Image (cartoon, grey):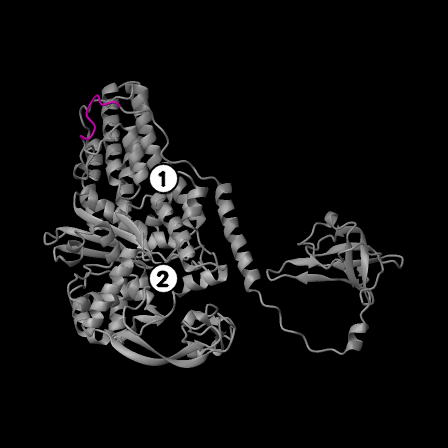
Amino acid sequence: MSKNFKRTLITSALPYANGPVHIGHLAGVYIPADIYARYLRLKGEDVLFIGGSDEHGVPIALKAKAEGTSPQEVVDRFHYIIKKSFEDLGITFDIYSRTTSETHYETASDFFRKLYDKGEFVEKTSEQYYDEEAKQFLADRYIVGKCPHCANEKAYGDQCESCGTSLSPLDLIEPKSAISGSTPILKETKHWYLPLDKHEGWLKQWILEDHKEWKSNVYGQCKSWLDMGLHPRAVSRDLDWGVPVPVDGAEGKVLYVWFDAPIGYISNTKELLPNDWEKWWKDESTRMLHFIGKDNIVFHCIVFPAMLKADGTYILPENVPANEFLNLEGDKISTSRNWAVWLHEYLEDFPGKQDVLRYVLTANAPETKDNDFTWKDFQARNNNELVAVFGNFVNRALVLTHKYFDGKIPTRHEITDYDKKTLEEFAGVKKDLEHYLDLFRFRDALKEAMNLARIGNKYLADTEPWKIAKTDMDRTETILNIALQITANLAIAFEPFLPFTSLKIRQLINKTDKSDLSWQELGSIDLLPVGHTINQPELLFEKIEDEVIAKQVQKLLDTKKANELKEHKASPLKQDIVFDDFTKLDIRVGKVLECVKVPKADKLLQFKIDDGLGGRTILSGIAQHYKPEELIGKNICFIANLPARTIRGIESQGMILSVENADGSLYLVQPAGDVLPGSPIV
């Protein structure tokens, strides 16, 4: 950290409290922020890590309406789930609060009022959709209609989730109110706007000239917005859920959630440090960092700084190390489609494996481009890296020490050239780790930490102390001393990344005091004194079997199938027929007497049917959906008066009726009651 800064304020994007946290949130925001906060604390620096739930806005109000409950009940439920799952994963917020707190309402109101009194807002009157039945203005998400681009009839007033096109309510064809179902009218309403165009000049200088060191994805997105020119942005909206606009005549209006939410960083700090919060927000010797995903870059690099600058008493962020998106099994993570790996469910399904998830999401973090999470990669990284390299090395070092030296650190005797080469390889680990961590390159930093485990694993494999012990105990002592010093270094190096594993190593080598194994000692070969007793070895990681992964993959496949069924639209109607055409069909009920697969035909089953007329044979292409033996004795429906056709040398005398589902699966049409064979369907 620069000598000009005395402290670091870290904020992480406030997760929206209309659902739990998923792996995309973790990889993009919370694990990187936690790694950095832990790193600074290990260095002894003054750091504050602020988090909290974002609890206002239209989606929460809509969810409450759909559930027949109140918005407060919705956010209470998800705030608890989010906070608990963060704690269980080891995310070390100094405070995790919420935007429905009393402190936040007061802070957000005061912030708006100060800018209002200074004349920093522009008042505008515009026409917006109004629901005459519900007697309220409609936010964009409260308006549904036909998308002008893809004809999806359930497009929202801000976006069509079918084709992904951004919309305005006026773009929709045949708009309807999501509240009453009625057709809304256009009605005038007044709102306040933050004139971003007024701040364009200094923003260009501050970002494009003064912060060229920002990550390329952040800098590039900001430059694109600034090059296009900034426009006033509304800071209020007509809604009954949020922080009320603190101005006379603003009844029924609340602060827009994008304006309200970032003030949550300030209010949460104030809640934690009511008498000391200003030094973290208004002292130039404080460095402020925003950890966010790419969808929040504009708000944290342009809009929120403009708000802070308009106030005039706040510092601006020094860096905004935003990440890109993490996809899931080749598809975009979607909360609405339940296409996600939810943190609270992961913690239930993989107890004690917090660090496996932290490791995989850091190793595969979407730092400069979108990345993909797959369960197979998760399994491979656990089994091939954490188990086979990291865990294997530590376990062998501890087991051999107990086998040959009763669990006491042996003496280091004469060092060979190979020993020197090994020691030189990890001597610079502290410098390399700090280099990457200071640049927010957490993937590269994790590789450096993991490289230390690889060095140790290779060292034991090459020196083979279990063989040397038969002839040269001094050499065995030296090898295991070095291996144990590397083990102690691993406890330090991995503490920002895998805190549960680091603690377990400390417990195994009997070094759990806070003064033991400090960050400053990383790279030392004298961390464990000769004669120091270590504890009995335990495995750091365990192999994850195929069936465990298969279960997770199946869960996603079930989700995809459910989504397909949910989104399925009935096929278009065929051309109209006259009633006489329908009466020509002789549809009857038959009972299955026999059913076998047709040889060399994957799809065909051969039925022998009791049709009440002496019996008949019918072939049907449903072999991939039913086993022959489960159909015997069942009643089915068939067309009895189709001309016979010869298929695969077998004469088929009719057609069995089936229903095709959205996912392509077939189901036989069967009468519900006990019907006599040959009964006609009328």
From this viewpoint, is residue 219 visible?
Answer: no
Of callouts 2 and 1, the N-terminal one: 2
Of 8 and 462, nearer the camera is 8
View extreme (left): residue? 4
- Depth check: give the residue in front, 653 or 60: 60
Amino acid type at mark 2: His
Dot 2: what SS? loop
Q: Position of residue 85 (x, y in %)?
A: 38, 46
Q: Which mark is residue 417?
A: none
Q: Nearer the viewer, mark 2 or mark 1?
A: 2
* Image quarter of residue 603: bottom right
Residue pointed to by mark 2: 56
Considering the whole magenta stretch, tell me its main secondary structure.
loop
Q: Which residues are magenta?
A: 526-533
Q: Is residue 608 left or right of residue 12?
A: right
Q: Nearer the viewer, residue 10 or 206?
A: 10
CA gap, disc 2 to disc 1? 41 Å
Q: Residue at x 42, y 56 (%)?
A: 74
274 in magenta: no
On screen, 209 above or below 436?
A: below
Report the residue marked by disc 1.
Answer: 386
- Quarter occupied by the C terminus: bottom right
* 136 horizontally vs 182: left or right: left
- Give the image location of residue 282, x and y in percent: 15, 58
Question: Which amino acid type is marked by label 1?
Answer: Leu
Callout 1: helix, strand or loop? helix
